[in-house]
Image: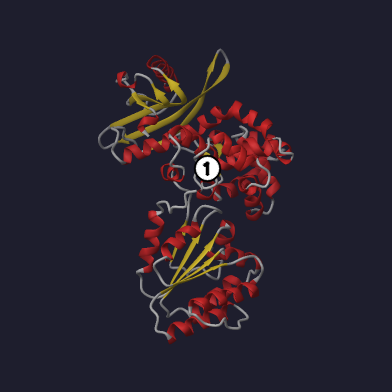
Amino acid sequence: MMRKFINRKEETEFLERQYKEEGLQVIVIYGRRRVGKTEIIKEFMKDKQHIYFLADKRGTLINAKEFATKAAEFFNDISPEVKNFENVFKYIVKRINERRMEKIVIAIDEFSYLVEKDDSIPSIFQKIIDEYISNEEIFLILNGSSISMMEKGVLSYSSPLYGRRTGQWKVTPLSFFDSGYFLPKYNRESFIEAFSVCGNIPAYLLQFDDSINVYENIKEKILKKGSFLNEEIAMCLKEELREPSTYFSILFAIANGATRVVEIADKTFMNPKDLSKYLETLQRLSLVKKEYPITEKKVQSKKTLYFIDDNFFRFWFRFVYPNKSDVEIGNTENIMKKISLEFNTYVGKIYEEICREVLIKKRALRETNINFNEVGRWWGHYRENGQRKEVEIDLVAINEDTNANKREIYFFECKWKDVDEQEATGIINNLKEKAKFVEWNNENRTEKFGIFAKKIEGKENLKEFFAFDLEDF
């Protein structure tokens, strides 16, 4: 299984930049579970003097004693008797000064566990910073996986540690492109299928085996009772949230097609007014995102849609959670039949998001002459014979340059299937009809059209519109 450190150039450059600063540095690293924070820290520390300590939930005294043991190992000492974290830092400073050591990195991993078990920890570390290490060449990293705990207990204005940090970084999931390095044996199509299941979280990608197909991985790595990925979602939500059952209901509703507030409320038997705080929390945790039609200048709640912003959560709530009884008794074949029937449709929706990322990447690398300021989805409605008709466009890119009097709008359909030249042309003709309903500089705009598909037979003959398939990824 591949264990190579993947990219994270921005994060490691940030740490290196801060490390070059003189004097005490207090760096806060945080982000959701399994996103790769610890690996980033270890990669950064590997060529530096460092003390690394992984905290747990057993309380302040036990953690302080184990931290002292780790520090003593670094100094090749016998572990000192300590009663608290202040004692440990006094010991560290004493040894640093005795040995006239240069800058040392001290990383406390899962700092949020300490805060969770003891709400005086931020005050204790404020005192440590102010009274014991303020004049030392120490690079202190406080890392935590509980986003709510880190934001409230460490980063908020009300926290005793507010103003003590010299830098902070929220670690986010990998890009689609970097995720591919974890499963190098897969071809493009198989990787997109795997990415649609695992998403862009390193720990989840590492669970998959690219020597077997995606369906076998789902069966062995997700549906098998007791497997890491089978239990992960429940553990993640229970650790982060006070009312996990409510969030389970909301995520299940969204994963199964309820995208508007009224629809989510209806599926969860909640008052729509009560949903906002839960949806805001899920957005802060990067588990849910809200979208508006790309052409909307004024945000209108009636047009707001909510989607799960993590592929593995999306897959788990779509296929695993509703079939938990079958999982419990090991009836994986029954679940696999359901997955196989819906999988192409499921992947197709995620493929639309991948196409957006590909288009942004191609523009950044100047691999296409498509220029745009914004890119996203569009949806709306019209009336025909008194009936309301819904219309959606997978991908819309806007290029508005008022100085050059340039207003370009690009429309794309994203099809998770193979198409030939004739079918692609038919799709574009249908797209042109849908584009008529998009209100954006209608009197003074240049319209261009395109298609994404798995494979486009005769692609080289389609000169009148943009045509991308997996060969272009």
Give the quarter of the image for residue 48: bottom left
* Quadrant that contains the C terminus: top left
> Badge 1: how crowded within 10 Å, few (<14), some, or many (20+)?
many
Give 342 or 74, whichever is nearer the viewer: 74
Amino acid type, callout 1:
Asp
Residue 59 position (above or below residue 365) = below
Residue to which mark 1 is pinned: 209
- Specify the farthest residue to the front: 211
Residue at 47 percent of width and 55 percent of height:
171
Q: Is residue 373 left or right of residue 179?
A: left
Residue 378 in sight here: yes
Residue at 58 percent of width and 63 percent of height:
112
- Specify the farthest residue to the bottom: 98
Give the x, y percent position of residue 34. 54, 53
Q: Is residue 275 left or right of residue 372?
A: right
Give the quarter of the image for residue 344: top right
Give the x, y percent position of residue 387. 58, 17
Give the x, y percent position of residue 410. 36, 28
Residue 293 in sight here: no
How many marks can you see? 1
Give 61 or 333, whichever is nearer the viewer: 333
Residue 153 position (above or below residue 290) = below
